[in-house]
Image (cartoon, rainbow, N blue to C red):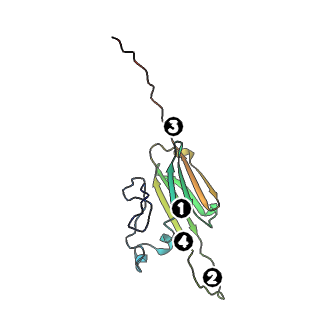
């Protein structure tokens, strides 16, 4: 995965990354972009998630400030796709309130990642602490080949 920002909106994913299932919306930011996707569902679709691989596991970290663990769903589908989804509810509007600025994003989000073959899908664990979701996918231990030294005669 490339760490170089893309020309398409400072994303840290790479369009050539076979494990990324990010969907790029070429009309994002245009006034009529709601015609392509419902703005309520796509406004928070870019939940920022880091994916690192350690010798023992694949670790995903998502910044989800203000969300409770009940508002987030972590699933493995089709045997190899990790899906992280949820919804942040918008604040109730009172008739007597005057809003000066609304910058916090509400709506649904969905991110999907194709997991490599070395993932132990039946041992996936997720934890939420201080608005950070951590999903740990252990890796299958790779057996080291038995090496037998051969004496050279002569």
Q: Secondary structure at mark 4?
A: strand
Q: Residue at x 59, y 85 (%)?
A: 100
Within 10 Å of the Cα at label 1, are there few (<14), some (14-19), or many (20+) other Cα atoms?
some
Label 1, label 4: how far apart the Cα atoms are? 11 Å
Give whichever of 66, 4 is nearer the camera: 4
Q: State which tag comes first along the sequence, 1 or 4.
A: 1
Give whichever of 29, 112 is nearer the camera: 29
Label 2, label 1: how far apart the Cα atoms are? 25 Å
Within 10 Å of the Cα at label 4, are there few (<14), some (14-19), or many (20+) other Cα atoms?
some
Residue that protrudes farthest toward the top in the picture: 154
Q: Residue at x 60, y 59 (%)?
A: 132
State yes or no: discs 3 and 2 in contact (Cβ < 8 Å). Answer: no
Label 3, label 2: how far apart the Cα atoms are? 53 Å
Q: Position of residue 127 (x, y in %)?
A: 62, 54
Q: State which tag comes first along the sequence, 3 or 2.
A: 2
Q: Which residue is mark 1?
A: 85
State yes or no: discs 1 and 4 in contact (Cβ < 8 Å). Answer: no
Q: Which residue is mark 4?
A: 107
Q: Residue at x 47, y 74 (%)?
A: 39
What quarter of the picture does the N terminus occupy?
Answer: bottom left
Taking the image as shown, residue 17 lies to the left or right of residue 126, namely left
Label 2, label 4: how far apart the Cα atoms are? 15 Å
State yes or no: discs 4 and 3 in contact (Cβ < 8 Å). Answer: no
- From the viewer's perspective, is the residue at label 3 or at label 2 nearer? 3
Q: Position of residue 133 (x, y in %)?
A: 59, 58
Q: Quadrant of residue 95?
A: bottom right
Label 4, label 3: how far apart the Cα atoms are? 39 Å
Q: Quadrant of residue 152?
A: top left
Q: Which residue is mark 2?
A: 93
Q: Secondary structure at mark 3?
A: loop
State yes or no: discs 1 and 3 in contact (Cβ < 8 Å). Answer: no
Label 1, label 3: how far apart the Cα atoms are? 29 Å
């Amino acid at each position: 995965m490339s760490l170089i920002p893309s020309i398409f909106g400072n994303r840290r994913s790479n369009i050539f990354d076979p494990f990324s299932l990010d969907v790029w919306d070429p009309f994002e930011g245009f006034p009529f972009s709601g015609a392509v996707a419902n703005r309520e569902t796509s406004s928070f679709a870019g939940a920022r998630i880091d994916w690192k691989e350690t010798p023992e596991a694949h670790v995903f970290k998502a910044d989800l400030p203000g969300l409770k663990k009940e508002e987030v769903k972590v699933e493995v589908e089709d045997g190899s796709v990790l899906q992280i989804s949820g919804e942040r509810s918008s604040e109730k509007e009172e008739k007597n309130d005057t809003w000066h600025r609304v910058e916090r994003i509400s709506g649904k989000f969905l991110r999907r990642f194709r997991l490599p073959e070395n993932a132990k899908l039946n041992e996936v664990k997720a934890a939420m602490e201080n608005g950070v979701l951590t999903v740990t996918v252990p890796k299958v231990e790779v057996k080291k080949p038995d090496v037998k030294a051969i004496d050279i005669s002569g």
